Image: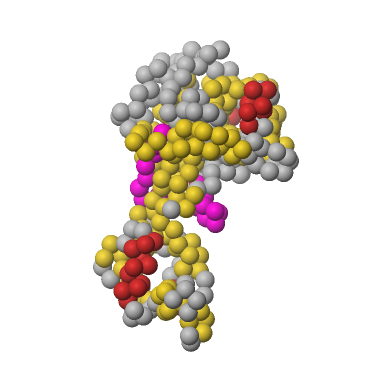
Amino acid sequence: MRRLKFFIAAALAAGCFFLGGNIHIADASADLYYIGGMTAGFSLSAGGVEVVGFKDVTSESGSSCPATEAGMRTGDIIVAVDGIHTRSVEELNAAFARSAGKPVTLTLKRDGEQAQIEVTPVRDKHADRYKIGILIRDTLSGIGTVTYIEKETMRFGALGHAVCGEDKTALTIADSSVYLCSIVSVNRGERGKAGELRGLFLNDSRIGAADKVCATGLYGKFSGGYDLSDCAAVQSAPLSEAAIGKATIYSTVDGVTPKAYEIAIAKVDANNRDNKNFVIKVTDERLIAETGGIVQGMSGSPILQNGKLIGAVTHVFLNDPTRGYGIGIEKMLEK
């Protein structure tokens, strides 16, 4: 299982909190959102083995890439070999070994439809294994921060940006699990180097499942057993209501409990095509002392202004870890 790099993220967490300060009195007819800020562990599966790239195989007869010769494409998901369901890299490698160099039929998911391709594995003379020249993954895992949970439906949104692996390609989700996560240490951010939250999955505490990833984040539903009764719920606000000045983010940088930290919004850009709708600066000395500013694992930390949810943290400036970007909450709610 490969480790998932969530650029700055934060997603779900373990425990609720009461929002202090100036909370907006909600319109009874408006949608309400529980404020996130809790970190969660995600284990995301493509429902098969996903092709993320190609590489020639060197055999006794020379170099070739059987996969591309057979017509395979990046993004194909291998779900079966010779009719046998295949969900993991290990199962796929075992199927190629059984082939002993004879053609196999791969069942693929491609663009929402199934296709079948015949391909002949070749023996890699360096690794002494049968291969077809594909770079693959079956599961990604990592930690992030939940931005909001819709009160009426228990749907959540997290991260505020696309979910990518180390190869920077977006993940296709077939099924997933979301667990409580406890932050145990922080690598502080420094100029020129992003910091990072380090956490432990509490694997006996599955709190939900994700079912969608896109350019604005990771989405899914909290399980019915997760207690949000003590959590404050607020309205959302469009980018047109956001203003330069003081605001608040909620993040978990130790244990499982989110805390409020002061920031300043330095710029609002409602039309940014990369969803970088805010430039923010951490002004809270407590957070700067603990993390150096914004670090990986804080993406998705909700941003509140005037008692309303207006966005989420997404990226850090490498030349100044106290500064970063945020996405407008309306962009996430559209998804």
Q: Is residue 172 magenta?
A: yes
At x 34%, y 36%, the residue is: 204
Q: Position of residue 12 (x, y in %)?
A: 45, 33
Name the quadrant of the C terminus. Answer: top left
Residue 322 position (above or below residue 112)? above
Quadrant assignment, res 289: top right
Residue 326 position (above or below residue 242)? below
Helix, strand or loop for the magenta stretch, by majority: loop
Q: Position of residue 3 (x, y in %)?
A: 49, 49
Q: Is residue 172 left or right of residue 10?
A: left
Q: Position of residue 176 (x, y in %)?
A: 37, 45
| Residue at the extreme left | 83
* Residue 51 visible in the displayed image: yes
Q: Position of residue 198 (x, y in %)?
A: 53, 38
Q: Is residue 152 left or right of residue 331?
A: left
Q: Nearer the viewer, residue 205 or 84?
A: 205
At x 51%, y 52%, the residue is: 165
* Residue 334 visible in the displayed image: no
At x 52%, y 33%, the residue is: 184
At x 41%, y 45%, the residue is: 43
Question: From which residue to which does the magenta span run?
Answer: 163-180
Q: State the scheme by which the image is colored.
A: secondary structure
Q: Is residue 314 left or right of residue 117?
A: right
